[in-house]
Image: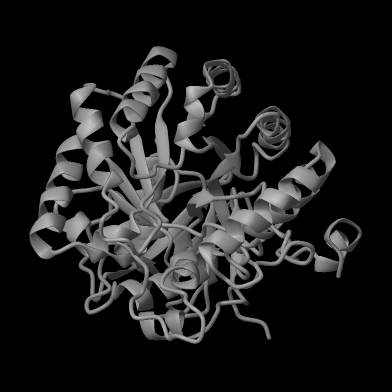
């Protein structure tokens, strides 16, 4: 099936006319919004957005592609992924769908199979998928137990350079916080992260040592100019309060870098007063929170022969209302932590709207995969439609929220610097010799 907007004019200067834009992802355009959507003409010149104008406002002599009120979004930011784990499911499935099952399956697979060649091929497959879906910025966590941290960061550095004109890439070292007790290992890890231009991360667990572990982490980050991105409270245990401990450590250490906390599931299991105090502390500390709704629905509250009783996600609305920077992301893709997914932010957005109740109204919902994650990742040039920005856009046949959220939008058109890209997805058969059919 084709649409009238499928081939924008092959010209150095043209107009995407009669478009519908999510207002939350548009900068410098003051048109009135209805349900968070605005009508506009987008003038593109030499791969850049020259102007965003009211419908009919573009010069009449310019070549036009009439979108007939179809939606246009900026390319997406996927700020929490695991490119090193992606697509190992066929050879290392999670036996029971639980968190412990995922940990053990990944551990065994990593130790047996994660050579540079294996990681590179799977990472490249994931990036090709993300690019075809319309993503232009990705942050990935990399399992960083020794000696894997050196292998994966070398591969990542190669991929970052190879993909720099298509997807901007960031990497976070992921490791159990208790491993910092091995001073030689931690010093080497910090050096690798610093030299490769990455971030320091870690998995926090409740213990009597958590406060001192966080102090060590933040001191190392400050001394080496590193930002921090942590896996936090990925559990249904109401006693898990490492998010609170992180906020306290940021304030105690006067840490000036950026801090992101992912998951934060147990916050939704706390009583109201405890949750309010933690949310306020997170806001005071300036910690950003990213929710991973699909993965958390898959793993959390999974017990044999029992229907889950909760959604697994954090207190997203309460955090946002308190002024905390919030976003959503893909997380894992076809690995033991999440059996599904394709690094498609449209799927992530659609499911986040349903799982987190980001609707009624939907006015600002588009921010969670566009402007918000781009800002958290320090790339305010990404994830927005604005004069002077690169014409990296995703065109949809959908004209309104109901149409957009009711189908997977498989017929979307992706423009990079104003040119239509090939959206062919890689065939899973390409991985058969690596992970099996």
Q: Nearer the viewer, residue 11 or 205?
A: 205
Q: From the viewer's perspective, is residue 388 above or below residue 228?
A: below
Asked whether, in this view, residue 1 is left or right of residue 259, the answer is right
Instruction: Tell how many labels.
Output: 0
Q: Position of residue 169 (x, y in %)?
A: 58, 39
Q: Quadrant of residue 353?
A: bottom left
For the C terminus, the quadrant is bottom right
User: At 45% across and 42% down in the image, what residue appears?
Assistant: 203
Q: From the viewer's perspective, is residue 210 above or below residue 33?
A: above
Q: Position of residue 107 (x, y in %)?
A: 67, 49
Q: Nearer the viewer, residue 23 or 188?
A: 188
For the N terminus, the quadrant is bottom right
Instruction: Evaluate whether residue 337 shows in this view.
Output: no
Q: Quadrant of residue 206?
A: top left
Q: Position of residue 309 (x, y in %)?
A: 34, 81
Judged from this view, the residue extending furthest toward the front is 208
User: At 37% across and 69% down in the image, what residue appears?
Assistant: 312
Asked whether, in this view, residue 268 is left or right of residue 134, the answer is left
Q: Nearer the viewer, residue 42 or 237?
A: 237
Q: From the viewer's perspective, is residue 245 above or below residue 319?
A: above
Instruction: Evaluate whether residue 259 shows in this view.
Output: yes
Q: Position of residue 212 (x, y in %)?
A: 31, 26
Asked whether, in this view, residue 174 is left or right of residue 220, the answer is right
């Amino acid at each position: 099936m084709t649409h009238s907007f499928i081939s924008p004019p092959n010209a150095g200067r043209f107009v995407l006319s009669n478009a519908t834009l999510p207002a939350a992802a548009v900068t410098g355009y003051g048109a009135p919004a209805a349900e968070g959507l605005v009508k506009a003409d987008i003038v593109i010149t030499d791969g850049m957005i020259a102007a965003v104008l009211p419908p009919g406002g573009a010069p009449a002599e310019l070549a036009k592609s009439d979108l007939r009120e179809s939606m246009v979004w900026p390319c997406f930011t996927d700020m929490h992924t695991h490119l090193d784990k992606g697509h190992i499911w066929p050879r290392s499935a999670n036996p029971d769908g639980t968190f412990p099952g995922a940990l053990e399956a990944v551990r065994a697979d990593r130790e047996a199979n994660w050579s540079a060649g294996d990681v590179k091929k799977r990472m490249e497959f994931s990036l090709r998928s993300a690019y075809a879906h319309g993503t232009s910025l990705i942050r990935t966590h990399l399992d960083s137990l020794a000696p894997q941290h050196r292998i994966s960061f070398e591969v990542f550095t190669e991929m970052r350079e190879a993909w720099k004109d298509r997807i901007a890439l960031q990497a976070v070292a992921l490791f159990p916080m208790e491993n910092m007790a091995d001073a030689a290992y931690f010093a080497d890890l910090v050096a690798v992260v610093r030299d490769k231009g990455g971030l320091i991360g870690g998995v926090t667990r409740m213990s009597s040592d958590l406060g001192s572990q966080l102090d060590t982490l933040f001191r190392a980050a400050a001394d080496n100019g590193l930002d921090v991105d942590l896996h936090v409270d990925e559990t249904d245990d109401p006693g898990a309060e490492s998010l609170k401990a992180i906020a306290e450590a940021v304030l105690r250490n006067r840490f000036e870098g950026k801090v992101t906390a992912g998951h934060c599931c147990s916050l939704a299991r706390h009583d109201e007063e405890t949750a309010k105090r933690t949310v306020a502390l997170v806001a005071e500390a300036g910690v950003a929170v990213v929710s991973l709704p699909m993965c958390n629905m898959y793993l959390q509250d999974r017990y044999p022969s029992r229907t889950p009783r909760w959604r697994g996600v954090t207190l997203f609305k309460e955090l946002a209302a308190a002024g905390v920077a919030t976003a959503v992301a893909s997380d894992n893709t076809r690995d033991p932590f999440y059996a599904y997914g394709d690094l498609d932010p449209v799927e992530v957005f659609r499911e986040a709207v349903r799982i987190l109740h980001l609707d009624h109204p939907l006015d600002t919902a588009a921010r969670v995969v566009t402007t918000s994650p781009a800002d958290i990742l320090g790339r305010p040039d990404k994830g927005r439609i604005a004069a002077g920005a690169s014409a990296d856009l995703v065109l949809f046949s959908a004209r309104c929220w109901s149409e957009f959220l009711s189908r997977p939008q498989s017929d979307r058109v992706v423009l990079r610097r104003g040119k239509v890209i090939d959206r062919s997805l890689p065939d899973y058969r390409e991985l058969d010799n690596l992970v099996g059919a």
